[in-house]
Image (cartoon, coloured by chain):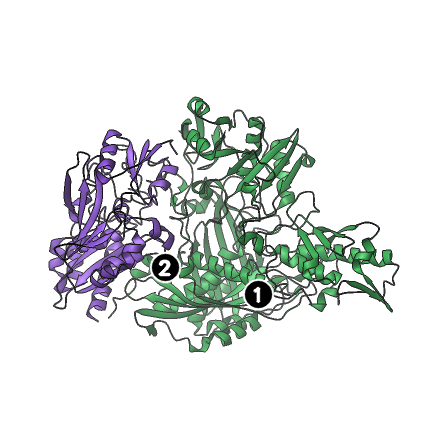
Amino acid sequence: MKPFTYERAGSPAEAAAAAARRPEAKFIAGGTNLLDLMKLQIETPAHLIDVNGLKLDTIEPTQEGGLRIGALVRNTDLAADERVRRDYGVLSRALLAGASGQLRNRATTAGNLLQRTRCPYFYDTNMACNKRRPGSGCSAIGGINRQHAVVGASEACIATHPSDMAVAMRVLDASIETVKPQGATRTISIAELHRLPGDTPNVETVLEAGELITAVTLPRPVGGSQQYRKVRDRASYAFALVSVAAIVQPDGSGRVALGGVAHKPWRLDAADAEMPRGAKAVAGKLFADAKPTEHNAFKLPLAERALASVLADARG
Amino acid sequence: MKFDTPATTNPIDQLKVVGQPVDRIDGRFKTTGTAPYAYERHDAAPDAAYGHVLGAAIAKGRIQSMDLAAAKAAPGVLAIVTAENAGKLGKGEYNTARLLGGPEIQHYHQAIALVVAETFEQARHAAGLIKVEYAPAKGAYDLAASRDKAKPAGTDDEPADSSVGDFDGAFGAAPVKLDATYTTPDQAHAMMEPHASTAAWNGDKLSLWTSNQMIAWSVGDMAKTLGIAKDRIHLMSPYVGGGFGGKLWVRADALLAALGARAARRPVKVALQRPLMFNNTTHRPATIQRLRIGATRDGTITAIGHDSWSGDLPDGKPETAVLQTRLLYAGANRLTRLRLSELDLPEGNSMRAPGEAPGMMALEIAMDEMAEKLGLDPVEFRIRNDTQVDPESPKRKFSQRQLTECLRTGAEKFGWAARRKPMQARDGRWLVGLGMAAAYRGAPVMKSAARVRLDARGIVTVETDMTDIGTGSYTIIAQTAAEMMGLPLQKVVVRLGDSTFPVSAGSGGQFGANSSTAGVYAACVKLREAVVKKLGLNAADAQFVDGEVRSGSRAIALGDAAKGGELVVEDAIEFGDLAKKYQQSTFGAHFVEVGVDAATAEVRLRRMLVVCAAGRILNPKSARSQVIGSMTMGAGAALMEELAIDARHGFFVNHDLAHYEVPVHADIPHQEVIFLDETDPMSSPMKAKGVGELGICGVAAAIANAIHNATGIRVRDYPITLDKLLKDMPLPA
C-alpha cells in the first residue's frame, strides 16, 4: 500500500473541490473495494477524501413520484427500504444477491456503481492489464476468461462490471446526480454512466476528475413483475456468471438488463422491444454483436435460459 | 510400548470419558481470542518487526537484477532478505522447491525477498518498491500435453505399478466393460489461517512460533535449511487455524521470519499474504485417470485397471490416485499404474486424503457407470464386489471391514430405495437426483510419544508435540489421559505442539488421532505403574477410579503419589507388523441428493449422509465435525474448486478467496453422519482409526452420480460447473 494522506470533507461541493486540488485523490465511502485494491497496489491514491460524513444517507420521495437515494445509503438499508421493496422489487432482490451481509452493511449506493472489475489479471500486478496499466495489454484475452465479457468488449479489455445493483438500476432507468469541483451539478442517466472499454478501458465512467455522485434517482414506479435472477457457481458470495434483471408487464411487454456479460449493465432498446416474443428473441438482440471466448461462450445460452426462466416465473 | 499383538481389554474400554461427545477443551480459548496463533505472539515476542514477502513474477527462469535501493530507503525498513544476502541455505527434506528463490526461479510467486519494517504497512509499501528484472525461461504447465512423457513413479511406501493375473486378457474378454477417463484439477488447501510465523533469535538459538502440523519434521527441515543443529531450534505450534496438509512442512514464512529476525536483529513475524497462498505454497496436483473395469453379466468384476497421471516439479512426487483401487474391490485380474510428468507449476503435495481423495473421485464414478451398464443398483454392485481380503494378496485380511454394513445402513437411512431412473424426479424448477459412492481411506499408524506428569493436586499434565489443527487433538488426548488415570476431564491439562515435548505422530494422513492417543495411553500405563509403586500398592488389583487409586481395602487420592515431588514419565507407542499382516483401513458410504436447475444447470445440494466404519470413535462430537468438514471440502471439489492454470505464464490465476471458490454456508445442506459401532484391536490399544480424511473420500463422486441421476448427463471432468452440463440439457418445458 502506498502511503496516503486523508481528510474528511464537510460538504459534497467541498469534497469535489478537494479532489480537484489533488489529482491523485480518491473519494472513500464504504471502502469495501477501494481498500482491498489499495492493499494490493492496484489503486494507489496519494490522498483520500472521506465522504462518509456528508449526510447523503437518506431515501426521499421525489416530486415526480420516484425515489432519491442518497449516495451514501448502505446497500443493506436500501435493500430493506419498504418503498424499494414495494415499488422497485428488482433493486432489492439484486442488492441481496450481491456480496455478503457484512459487505452490504458497509457498501454504499454510489460506491457500488463505481466498484471495479474482478478480472483476476486486473488483480495481479505482475500481469499486463490495460485497465491497471494502460497500454500494457490484456492478459485475459487468450487466458483464463470464463468470467469475462461476451458482448461490448474490445481488443483492449474483456472485463465485466461486477455489480448486481447496477443491473437493477439500469433496468429501472435510474439517474445519477453529481456535483463537480466548481460546484455545478448534473444528472447522468445510468445508461450513460458506464463506458464500454474501447481503447481506454481504464476510463470506466463519464465522471470527470473530482466529480462526486450525490444521489441516485429512481423514476416513478413502473409496476410489473420485477425479477432478478443471478446465476453463479456457488449459492452465495460469488460474482454472477450471468444475471438477469427484468420487469415484465401483464401484456408481456417489458425490459431486461443483463449482468456478468459486459463492461456495463447490458440493456438494448431493440431487445426490450422483443420481450413479448420471448427469451430467444430478446437474447438474439442482446447478443447480436456478441464475441464470446472459448471459455465463456456458455454465457449466451445461459443468459437466454435464465431469461426464459425469469419470464416463466413472471407469467406464473 | 511396543504394539505388536492385538489389543485386549484395557482401561480405555471403560469408556467413561473416551467415546463421550465432550466439547473441545480448546474451544473457549478459540472463541474468546485467548488461543494465540503464530502471528499473535505479542506475549512472547513483544517487539516483533513485520516482514512482507515478495513473490516471483515469473514461473521459471532467472532473476537478472534486483534493485533494492528504493525499498531500503523507504520509511521504517529494517532489513531486506534475498537469496543473495541470506547466506548459504540448504533445502528441507520435505520441500521440493527452495523456500527462498533466486537467482533461479522454480515457480510463480516463489519467495524472492522479505522486507522487514517497523510496521506491516511500511514493509508492504517497501516491498512494492523493489525492482526485479527477470530472464524468463520456457516451462511445462500442461499435464495433458506432457502425458506421453510421464514416467513411472511410486512413493516410499507404494510402488508405481501393481498387477495381479492377466488384466488385459480378462478385460478384453469381459462381457460388460467400461473404459473411461476422468480428470481432477489442481486444488488449494485454502485454510483460514495462512502460513504464519514469528521468529526470535537468542544468540544462536532460534525460537519459532509457526503454524504447523508436524513439529519434528519441521525442526529437522528448518535445521537443514538454515544449516544449524536441531537443538538450536525451539519450534512451537500450539494452535493452528487449519492446515489440511498444507502445513505438514515448513514453508517460506518460517524460513523468512528466521532470516529476517537474524538480519534485523529483533523478532520478526511473517504471514503469507493471501494472494501468495495459492502459488507460493503446495497444492493438491491435478490428475488424469483412466479406469477400465470388466465384469460378468451378473456384476462380478473380473478385471479392474486404474492408470493415473499427475505432474510435479523435478524431484517431486506423484499424486497416488490409484491406491484405493488396489484394495477396495475384488477382481481376479488387476492393474494399477502411477505416472508422473515434470511440470513447472508450483509444488504439488499432500492435501487432505492425498491419493484417495482424487482417486475416489474417479473410481466411484466409474463404479456408478458400470452399475448402470450392468443394470444393477450401484449399492448392490459394490456389495457384490466387496472383499474381506486384500485383493492383491488374498492371504492378507482386513483388520476390520464393514463396507457392506455402511452401504446397507446408508441406503436404508437415506431412503435410497426411492431413487428413480435418471431424469425422472422433479421438484418445481429442480431436477432431483440421488447418488452414492463408497468411502475408503487407509488407516496408517505412526510412532508417537508423550510425557505425563502427576502433581500433588492430582492433576495430570500431558506433553507431546502432537498438533491440533482444529481437529480436536487436545480433547481426545485429555479424554485418553482422564480415562487411563481415573480422572474427570477437568483434572487433565494438555500441552501440545512444542519441540521440547516428546515426538508424536503429528497431524496428517488421518494417523494423528489413533497414534497420538495411543502414545498417551502408553505413557499413562507407565504412570500408573509409577503411582502404584510409589504408593506401595498391589499392581495386580490397583484400580484408578474417581481420582483415587484403590487396591484391596485401601483408597488413596491419586495426587498423594506425587506428594514427595511430581511424578514424570515418558513413553511412546511403537507399532509392530500388525499393519503389514492385516490391511487397516476405514470405510464408509456417501449418499447425496442434488437439485439441478432445469434452466440454468446450477447444482445445489439438498441432503448429504455418510455412514462411517472407522474403529472406535474417540469423541463422536469432534469426529462428526471432522466428517462434515470433509464432506464440505468434497462438495467444493465436486462443484467449484479448481486452480485455473494460465498455461502461457505458468501459474494459478485465481489466487485469492474471491476467485478460488470454496463452499459457503448456503451451499451446504443438512449433513448426517452415522458411525457404525466398531473397535479394531489390530489398530492400537485405543482400537481406533481416524476419520479426518475418510469423509472427503468418495463424496465428490456421490455428487457427480447424483447429478447424473438428475440430468442423465455424465460429467467426468471436475469440478462439475454448470457450463459442463448446459450443453446437454434440454430446454425446460
Q: Secondary structure at mark 1?
A: strand
- State how many labels appear: 2
- Residue B605: x and y, percent? 40, 65
**Which of the pair B292/B5 is nearer the observer?**
B5
Q: Secondary structure at mark 2?
A: loop
Q: Is residue B337 left or right of residue A87?
A: right
Chain A painted colour: purple
Res B97 visible: no
Mark on residue B587? Answer: 1
- Residue B47: x and y, percent? 56, 33
* Chain of the residue under label 1: B
Question: Looking at the image, is B414 positioned above or below residue B93?
Answer: below
The amino acid marked with disc number 2 is Ala
- Residue B93: x and y, percent? 60, 39
Q: What's the residue at 69%, 60% (across, down)?
A: B480
> Which quadrant of the view contains residue B69?
top left
Image quarter of the N terminus of chain B: bottom right
Mark 2 lies on residue:
A235
**Which of the pair A75/B682 is nearer the observer?**
A75
Q: Which chain is green?
A: B
Q: Disc 1 or disc 2, which is closer to the eye?
A: 2
The amino acid marked with disc number 1 is Phe
**Which of the pair A17/B190 is nearer the observer?**
A17
State if disc 2 and disc 1 touch (CB < 8 Å).
Answer: no
